[in-house]
């Protein structure tokens, strides 16, 4: 039994434990033990991965295992990780861990669906079989409906239904795309690595076929990754969701979209990616700027963060479509960095909302003096969001824009320049929000009485700040790990494209 | 005349033995009103007998000698399908136990079991048919007792109306079917399935019309659009266990028989029936989804859901591939456990509280959390959400249709799964999110219902993840193409 499967087995054990647990203490104990185990497992995986890479193992995927599942249909239970997956698993581990502490007061059913959601996420990142990836993607979708619909705030039923239906629509596109890729490559294997390397009966997908399936697959994943006109589920969904659910969704689930776009759409259909990338570049670029500008006019804290997430996740897709090693490395670092950052942001917004009863920027003032710990955390999250050097956002954005600019033609460069304006917009909405909420003089007597963070909230905030600052100050180990896997993928794509620049 | 050939039909003989035993038990065990002796319920007997018969069917040798010149055929797949239908009938018997305990039903419970098993016997004949006459006998045997079942609660006007609609539509469509069969006989000179394929000629218009009539006749049984108009009223008017039986068993058997006849007899006409079914499927799924959204009555809602699911089942027919056959049987099995789960819960709620509207299910999670949870799992399976079996069955049936080359059909069907998710989620929303002033009060279900629900839950949760069931079906599947 491959140790990667533990990422799926531990959540299953957690769900069983939750079902049997009695009382609040039992529930909290199960969740803390389980999420700590998952975090520990992802850290162990990262360390093991780095040591194996340092020892000279240069295989594309490590710790692979494959068991025949539905052999008449060539579906396997196939797992394996590379640098990108390890980074994503680390991200998921941290966010599930901190999310548990942020949801300290929640009932058992909430944690059951939350754990199911996390199982879907972990399973997605460890799988290298297309059916398995799709199955875990869908497992991660449906608990959202119940989590938002039952425990959310505001227009929760509307937001939950809209989110679920739009994401299911995306998965409908995705299923079509997966069939197209499977049968286009010969119908002999569902394994991503086999299809990419044309082994075990898989052959190159015909160009005409690629032109049909690439847009369908890319849109299918792109809806989840906030591709421009399909991002509308995101603001309502994130804002109506309970705090930890927003953290997990914006922090990890939206990264499933970017990861899928890269691993399946672009990696398996590189010629189509090269020819058609310009359409999606325009869409992603629009999303980046539009999200940032929309965030500037928001009055609700959660909506502001949701639009900011649309902008940053759009940046991930933007970078992936540039088809250079640096930009793709930057995209993965951005997935990691933005995940942590937005989780921190949503966590603190949730804590403020819980205490002050309002998320409206116009009604909050002078919180720095009232709840200093949370306010400092909030400020750090904001600064990471706008890309302050020393925090992870800067590393990611710099790598993305340098990598995007490496494409020497006018189209890519102009788009890159336009996308960088989102940094300015980010500065506007972040600084305006921080200045208004944290500083100034509080006029609401109710707000003066609110108390600062409890121990479990402090733990979550400190862990997230530690990760954000850690990556910001010492990014080379993670950048190296990611680039070690992006590089071979880009070389593979480079066999077919002329735009690729495999040197950093 | 060699009467020993009857012994080759061991599946049917074993079921006939069960019917005879139940008949005798009803005669001697149950009292009647005149003598004043209270009726003892037949209790476990039908359930035990059916279980034994299913096990026998699975273990007995599955291929036999030529029977009656090929009129009756037996392949392993046919036995498997019959076993699947048996499992469904078993769950229906389990769910109907509490309904049988009502005083007006206790008197005539033997009739319920005999009528149900008679229709099942008819389906067995239909499945094993090798000749159109056998097929027609089976079809009629499956339809006529069903009318009596639908009108079982004869004092209820709705049931009588539902039954009348059912029998009139059934008679009309079997008349149409019979006309098609006679046209085929006129042009081919034989009604044996194995001989007909060689004598069919794609340029013959009469045979094409016969194909259209055949599809119409069988389309009624599967409740495809435009042959679906009886479905909503009949499902609403019939007693809930009968609706459950109708929605899965008769639909499942008819879908399988459709596939067999199409590949055996109408093989040369494959392009024609592919085209016909493309439109039927698109319209079935879309129309049913649109109507299902607006329903208030739970049984009517399930009727439209059933029409839409019928559209999905028939997708496996496209192309006539062996992978399609496996997908159809697997889909029927998964649909059976999920749908019967929903109906069992609907039945027990109706028996305990008399409520049948979707709005009565509001806040069910607060009063009966376990029932609400099982209902959610079954609805998610029907919608195609992993990790439940419905996801796998939908994926595989789309895969089979995609492999046969019908990409656009798969795309349209996939978009429709989103609409169907919406209306299944409406019930989930009602149970978990909405508030209710008069919710269904908490109750304990009886033992039989619990066993039935356990079977359905195990099926819904494990039939997908454990690949053995699909692989078992796949070893016996056959078709025009792999």
Image (cartoon, rainbow, N blue to C red):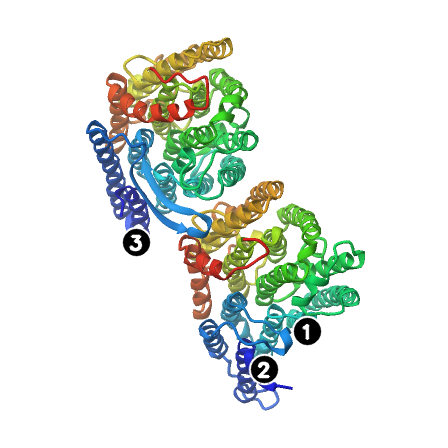
Real-space CA distance between mark 2 and mark 3, rounded to the nearest whole angstrom: 57 Å
**Image coords of residue B436 (percent x, y):** 52, 50
Furthest-front residue in view?
B198
Residue under the image location 45 percent in, 9 percent down: A408
Whether the residues at callouts 2 and 3 have beta carbons within 8 Å, the answer is no
Q: Nearer the viewer, residue A16 or B85?
A: B85
Same chain under badges 3 and 1? The reply is no
Q: Which residue has dot 2 on it?
A: B5
Q: Residue furthest bottom?
A: B35
Residue behind mark 3: A20
Judged by depth in the image, the label closer to the viewer, 3 or 1, is 1
Q: Is residue A348 visible?
A: no
Residue at the spot of label 1:
B137
Viewed as shown, does residue B6 lie left or right of A127?
A: right
Label 1 close to label 2 by CB (< 8 Å): no
Q: Residue A204 placed where, x, y %?
A: 48, 33
């Amino acid at each position: 039994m491959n140790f990667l499967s533990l990422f799926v087995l531990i959540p299953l054990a957690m769900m069983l434990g939750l079902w049997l647990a009695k009382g609040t203490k039992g529930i909290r104990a199960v969740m803390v033990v389980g999420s700590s185990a998952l975090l520990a497992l992802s850290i162990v995986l990262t360390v093991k991965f780095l040591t194996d890479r340092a020892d000279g193992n240069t295989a594309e995927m490590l710790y692979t295992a494959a068991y025949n599942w539905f052999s008449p249909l060539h579906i396997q239970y196939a797992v394996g990780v590379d640098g990108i997956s390890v980074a994503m698993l680390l991200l998921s581990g941290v966010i599930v861990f901190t999310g548990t502490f942020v949801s300290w007061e929640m009932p058992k059913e909430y944690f059951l669906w939350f754990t199911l959601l996390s199982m879907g996420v972990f399973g997605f990142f460890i799988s290298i079989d297309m059916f398995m990836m799709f199955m875990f993607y869908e497992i991660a979708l449906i608990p959202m409906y119940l989590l938002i619909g039952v425990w959310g705030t505001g227009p929760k039923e509307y937001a939950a239904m809209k989110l679920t239906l739009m994401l299911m629509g995306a998965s409908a596109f995705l299923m079509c795309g997966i069939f197209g890729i499977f049968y286009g490559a010969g119908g002999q294997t569902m394994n991503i690595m086999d299809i990419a390397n044309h082994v075990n009966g898989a052959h190159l997908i015909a160009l005409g076929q690629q032109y049909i399936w690439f847009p369908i697959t890319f849109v299918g994943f792109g809806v989840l990754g906030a591709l421009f006109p399909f991002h509308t589920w995101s603001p309502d969904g994130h804002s109506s969701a309970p705090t930890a659910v927003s953290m997990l969704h914006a922090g990890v689930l939206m990264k499933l979209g970017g990861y899928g776009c890269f691993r399946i759409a672009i990696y398996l259909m590189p010629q189509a990616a090269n020819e058609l990338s310009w359409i999606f570049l325009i869409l992603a670029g629009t999303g980046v700027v539009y999200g940032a500008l929309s965030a500037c006019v928001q009055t609700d804290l959660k909506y502001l963060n949701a639009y900011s997430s649309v902008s940053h996740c759009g940046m991930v897709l933007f970078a992936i479509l540039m088809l250079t090693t640096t930009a793709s490395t930057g995209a993965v670092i951005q997935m990691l960095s933005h995940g942590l950052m937005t989780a921190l942001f949503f966590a603190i917004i949730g804590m403020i909302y819980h205490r002050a009863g309002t998320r409206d920027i116009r009604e909050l003032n002078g919180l720095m003096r009232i709840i200093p710990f949370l306010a400092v955390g909030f400020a750090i999250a904001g600064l990471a969001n706008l890309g302050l050097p020393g925090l992870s956002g800067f590393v990611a954005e710099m790598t993305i824009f340098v990598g995007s600019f490496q494409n020497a033609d006018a189209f890519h460069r102009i788009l890159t320049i336009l996308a960088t304006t989102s940094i300015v917009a980010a500065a506007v909405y972040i600084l305006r929000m921080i200045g208004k909420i944290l500083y100034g003089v509080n006029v609401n007597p109710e707000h003066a009485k609110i108390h600062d963070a409890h121990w479990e909230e402090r733990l979550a905030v400190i862990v997230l700040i530690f990760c954000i600052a850690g990556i910001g100050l010492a990014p080379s180990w993670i950048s190296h790990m990611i680039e070690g896997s992006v590089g071979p993928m880009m070389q593979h794509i480079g066999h077919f494209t002329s735009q690729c620049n495999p040197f950093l | 005349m060699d009467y020993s050939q009857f012994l080759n039909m061991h599946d049917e003989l074993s079921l006939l033995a069960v019917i005879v035993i139940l008949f005798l038990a009803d005669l001697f065990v149950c009292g009647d009103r005149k003598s004043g002796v209270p009726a003892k319920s037949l209790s476990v007997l039908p359930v035990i007998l059916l279980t034994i018969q299913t096990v026998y069917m699975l273990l007995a040798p599955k291929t036999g000698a030529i029977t009656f010149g090929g009129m009756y055929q037996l392949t392993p797949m046919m036995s498997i399908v019959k076993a699947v239908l048996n499992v469904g009938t078993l769950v229906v018997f389990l769910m109907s136990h509490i309904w049988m305990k009502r005083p007006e039903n206790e008197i005539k419970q033997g009739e319920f079991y005999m009528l149900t098993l008679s229709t099942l016997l008819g389906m067995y004949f239909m499945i094993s048919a090798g000749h159109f006459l056998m097929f027609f006998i089976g079809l009629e045997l499956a339809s006529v007792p069903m009318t009596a079942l639908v009108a079982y609660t004869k004092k209820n006007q709705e049931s009588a109306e539902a039954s009348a609609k059912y029998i009139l539509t059934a008679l009309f469509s079997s008349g149409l079917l019979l006309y098609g069969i006679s046209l085929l006989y006129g042009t081919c000179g034989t009604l044996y399935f194995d001989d007909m394929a060689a004598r069919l000629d794609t340029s013959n218009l009469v045979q094409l019309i016969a194909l259209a009539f055949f599809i119409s006749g069988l389309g009624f049984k599967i409740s495809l659009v435009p042959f679906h108009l009886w479905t909503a009223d009949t499902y609403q008017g019939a007693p809930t266990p009968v609706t459950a039986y109708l929605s899965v068993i008769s639909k499942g058997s008819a879908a399988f028989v459709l596939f067999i006849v199409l590949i055996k007899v109408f093989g040369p006409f494959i392009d024609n029936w592919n085209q016909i079914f493309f439109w039927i499927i698109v319209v079935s799924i879309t129309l049913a989804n649109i109507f299902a959204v607006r329903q208030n009555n739970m049984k009517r809602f399930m009727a439209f859901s059933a029409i839409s699911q019928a559209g999905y089942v028939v997708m496996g027919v496209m192309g006539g591939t062996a992978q399609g056959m496996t997908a159809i049987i697997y889909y029927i099995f998964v649909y059976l456990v999920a749908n019967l789960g929903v109906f069992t819960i609907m039945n027990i709620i109706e028996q305990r509280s008399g409520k049948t509207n979707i709005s009565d299910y509001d806040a069910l999670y607060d009063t009966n959390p376990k029932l609400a949870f099982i209902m959610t799992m079954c609805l998610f399976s029907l919608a195609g959400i992993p990790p439940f079996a419905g996801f796998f069955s939908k994926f595989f049936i789309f895969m089979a249709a995609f492999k046969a080359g019908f990409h656009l059909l798969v795309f349209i069907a996939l978009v429709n799964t989103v609409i169907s998710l919406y209306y299944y989620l409406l019930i989930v929303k009602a149970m978990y999110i909405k508030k209710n002033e008069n919710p269904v009060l908490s109750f304990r279900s009886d033992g039989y219902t619990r066993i039935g629900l356990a079977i359905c839950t195990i099926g819904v949760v494990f039939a997908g993840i454990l690949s053995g069931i699909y692989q078992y079906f796949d070893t016996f599947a056959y078709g025009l193409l792999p």
